[in-house]
Image (cartoon, rainbow, N blue to C red):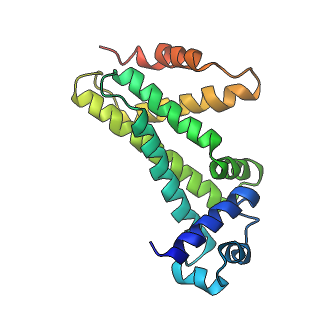
Amino acid sequence: MSEKRKQIIEAATKSFSLFGYKATTMDQVAKMANVGKGTIYTFFKSKEELLEEIVSSIISEIKHEADAAIDQHLSFKENVQRALQRIFTFRKEHELTIKLLQEVRDIGTPAVRDVMKRLDREMIAYVREKIEEAMAKGEIRSCDPELTAFLMFKMYIALNVDWEKEHEPLPQQKMAELFDLYLLKGLSR
């Protein structure tokens, strides 16, 4: 990747994190990157394309984090919980994802809503792959991996985000117990 392109991506990430997507202008990005506005357009057709590039990088980072949480010596049940927890910790702590989720909630910017949906789809696809691997190894019984991944992902959102809106946050151990009780016991052999 060229140095200028990298500077632009870093500046846009910083601007989107500070001001949100909607409030960020290409002029701001150019100033922060210390390049001319025209230079940005040699690499990216639009602000939306720039956001897509950044989110693609975040998706790769999240998958890397989730992979790092997986321990081949542990069961599917333990690994899926570890991977999902790592995904949600990343989302809750990463400045840009925090700002983008906030923008979707408060403003509903279509481009941001679309990339956040893409992020969710990619995470569900990641979990689906882990489910398919576990079925192939005989660790869990046969199920619809897409639907099961969707339910696992949404349950983690419910326990990590939605529950906390009106209740005390659940300790990690309690979330693992609930996840096991409501979802994984039905998959166990």
Which quadrant of the structure image shows residue 64? Answer: top left
Is residue 169 shown left or right of residue 83?
Answer: right
Which quadrant of the structure image shows residue 25? Answer: bottom right
User: What x and y, as percent, mark residue 38?
Assistant: 62, 86
State the quadrant of the C terminus: top left
Furthest toward the left, the residue is: 137
Picture residue at 34% right of the left edge, 39% below the top: 129
Is residue 131 shown left or right of residue 30?
Answer: left
Picture residue at 28% right of the left edge, 25% below the top: 142
Picture residue at 64% right of the left edge, 58% below the top: 112
Is residue 50 shown left or right of residue 125?
Answer: right
Picture residue at 74% right of the left edge, 57% below the top: 18
Is residue 178 shown left or right of residue 147?
Answer: right
User: What x and y, as percent, mark residue 14?
Assistant: 67, 61
Task: State whether residue 119 is above or below residue 90.
Answer: below
State the quadrant of the N terminus: bottom left
User: What x and y, as percent, mark residue 16?
Assistant: 68, 61
User: What x and y, as percent, mark residue 168?
Assistant: 74, 20
Q: Nearer the viewer, residue 15 or 122?
A: 15
Q: Nearer the viewer, residue 3 or 61?
A: 3
